[in-house]
Amino acid sequence: MDASFRYPMDFSFYIQNFTTIAYNRVVKPKQQATLYYQFFVSESFAARSFGLTVNLLYRDADGIQYLNSVFNETINVVEIDEGLDGETFFLYVFLAACGVLLLVGAQQLLVNMGKKKSSAKPKVEMGTQNVNDVDYDWLPKETLNELNKSPRRSPRQSPRQRRVKRGTGSGDE
């Protein structure tokens, strides 16, 4: 017994030959026999139509050989869906990541909408404009006493104050 794939439009054109198996079985007259023939199709042939021809070579009681086509039809080769393949797995991972991203975005939107807007004006740092408002409680008492005895002024003056003094001179220059 042998089998082959053929081009469906021209059965004389072979696409793939399968293994020939010799059974060497004697079948008595007026009886039938079932023969098991297994073959594997290449993955590149999936989802296409082919002509499948199965031939049986046998001899009669007189020793005359015959070749009979026991199956000769066009078939469709389909790929078996075996559950989870790599492409499907990564599709599920991508969909899960998109779902998590949507949930995080919705949570952030709800948090931002749930916050009450403060109508109070923002506080602006004014610095130490008034020297009397400075809190000296954190200083040691000895340092505080020294500061109170001799008020320290910076020997340098700002450039603006120097210009003012120069411009207001007595005229003896």
Image: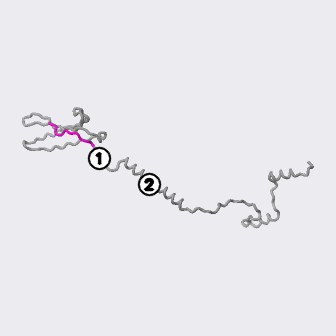
Look at 20% across and 39% down and name the residue there: 73
Residue found at the far right of this picture: 172
State which region is magenta.
68-77
User: Magenta segment: does it hold 151?
Assistant: no
Look at 71% across and 60% down and name the residue there: 126
Q: Earlier in the sequence, mark 2 or mark 1?
A: 1
Secondary structure under tag 2 reads helix
Could you say which is closer to the camera, residue 90 or residue 138? Answer: 90
- Find residue 99 and report its horizontal and vertical position in percent: 44, 54
User: In the drawing, does residue 109 fall left or right of residue 60?
Assistant: right
50 over 92 or under it: above or below: above
Mark nearer the viewer, 2 or 1 = 2
Report which residue position mark 2 lands on.
Answer: 99
87 over 113 or under it: above or below: above
Report which residue position mark 1 lands on.
Answer: 80
* Distance of label 2 from label 1 (alpha carbons): 30 Å
In the rendered image, the quadrant that contains the N terminus is top left
Name the magenta segment's main secondary structure. strand
Residue found at the far front of this picture: 119
User: Magenta segment: does it hold 74?
Assistant: yes
Q: Are marks 2 and 1 in contact (CB under 8 Å)?
A: no
